[in-house]
Amino acid sequence: MATRAFDIASLAIALLRASGIPARYVHRTIEVDEARFRNWIGGFEHIDAAIEYAASGGVPIAVLTAGCAVTRVQLEHVWVEVALDFHPSRGMINRSADTWVPFDPSFKQYDFLEGLDPVDVSGLDLDGLQNEILASGQANLDEHWVTGFDAAILQQAQETMQAALEARVADMPNARSPHHSVADQGLHGRVTEPRGRGGHPLRATANGSSLAHYVWLRQRHFWRASAIGAATLGRTGQQAHHLEFPTRHHRG
């Protein structure tokens, strides 16, 4: 999970810098309530399973309890700060940067939808399909070989299911949205809380670092961040000039 957040932050920084917008890494310990943590990690029903999954990826993690129940989770995290002309347009008009604005492209909350069953939607008879395929070729169970099956039968079944799914999705709410597809309907879930609008949604519990570059090293099954370069950066990502203005506070 630590490396995933780092990789996503690295991509965001590369794109921002390529657009001429100064950006830097932020590495701190954050605190997340257990329900949002379970959702973020992958929709886990039980907090213990979510913690075990995150820890298996080498993320330093701790829990806060109340009444013998886990209520909040603390973990190391990496996100981005972007130098924007934040006042008064909140970055809509970006003339002269005055604020480091938190931007976390890896923290998301999902609305997990019930998936569509292609067989139910298309009304396809799987037993009939199997018999039709078997009848189109030859099989020798004693010698363990098969031959001559008509692949067009299976292809036609796939095309039938695809057409039925597309028709069902087209009848759903928001079907005209350019981002609405079969995959949105439960196969991956829907992002309901993207971040990067001027404030970080999670509370930082310990001071960390804001740096131009990071190198991640694997040591004893944990990821350690090593800083390279200066905490300030120019538009090319190199140390060119200092950007001395405040960072927006984290929201608790």
Image (tube, rainbow, N blue to C red):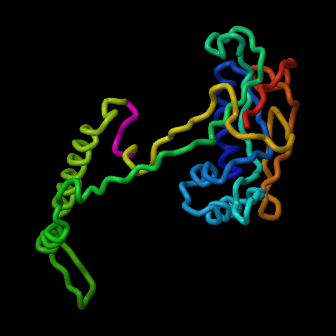
Residue at x 74% of width, y 47% of height: 31
Q: State which region is magenta.
A: 178-183
Pinpoint residue 238: horizontal percent, then vertical percent.
81, 26
Q: Which secondary structure class fits the magenta region best?
A: loop
Image point 71% across, 18% down: which residue?
84
Residue 134 falls left or right of residue 231: left
Query: Is residue 191 located in the magenta-colored stretch of the structure?
Result: no
Task: Decide which of 143, 214 is in the foreground and name it.
Answer: 214
Task: Tell me the quarter of the image containing the C terminus.
Answer: top right
> Residue furthest toward the front?
67
Q: Does the magenta stretch include residue 179?
A: yes
**Residue located at (79% from left, 41% from top):** 204
Q: How many labels does the image show?
A: 0
| Rendered position, 204 above or below 58 | above
Asked if 201 appears above or below 153 in the picture, the reply is above
For this orientation, the residue located farthest to the bottom is: 142
Give above or below for 239 relative to 155.
above
Residue 30 percent across, percent down from the top left:
76, 45
Q: Where is residue 236 in the image (x, y as percent from the top left)?
A: 75, 22
Residue 45 position within the rendered picture, expressed as x and y whole percent measured from the top left: 54, 61
Q: Quadrant of residue 181?
A: top left
Q: Is residue 6 above or below residue 134?
A: above
In screen coordinates, is 47 left or right of 124? right
Residue at the image position 64 percent from the left and 51 percent from the top: 37
Q: In this view, does 152 lie to the left or right of 191?
A: left
Compare residues 108 and 234 and report the one nearer the observer. Answer: 108
Q: Nearer the viewer, residue 233 or 139?
A: 233
